[in-house]
Amino acid sequence: MEAPLVIRCRKDGPLVVEQPVTIVDHEGRVLDVPGDKPLVALCRCGHSRKKPFCDGTHRVVGFRSEPADCAPPTSADP
């Protein structure tokens, strides 16, 4: 049985995918994710020049996440 995919929410930072992953854009193209990296950081601030990947710009623009950004869903969430 495979281990579940783990995505960590970093406070005031990116979403970090902790195992190999395939990322597909809205047109069905597979994005180049280096196979030698154990982690992939995905932008949450919207300012990265390498979207959907994080380039650290969240620190420059002062991105702050809200506690609810990484809270477990409630039964009312879609």
Image (cartoon, grey):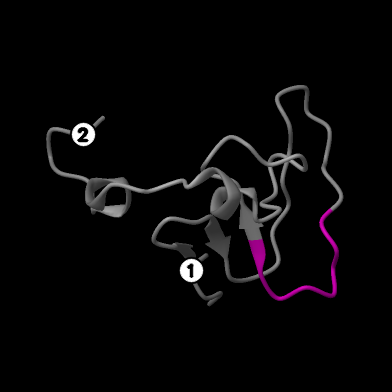
The residues colored magenta run 33-40
Q: In 3D space, how far apart are the residues under numbered discs 2 and 1 (Cα atoms)?
A: 22 Å
Residue 53 percent across, percent down from the top left: 70, 49
Q: Quadrant of the C terminus?
A: top left
Kindly indicate the quadrant of the structure image that contains residue 52.
top right
Amino acid type, mark 1: Pro
- As drawn, 36 above or below 7: below
Q: Quadrant of residue 25?
A: top right
Query: Residue at image x 69%, y 59%?
Result: 21
Percent of width and height locating residue 10 = 44, 63
Amino acid carrying mark 2 in the image: Asp
Q: Residue at x 84, y 68 (%)?
A: 35
Question: In this figure, which residue is indicated by the disc labeled 1?
Answer: 4
Instruction: Name the residue nearer the viewer: 2 or 10.
Output: 10
Q: Is residue 24 left or right of residue 5?
A: right
15 left or right of 73 in image:
right
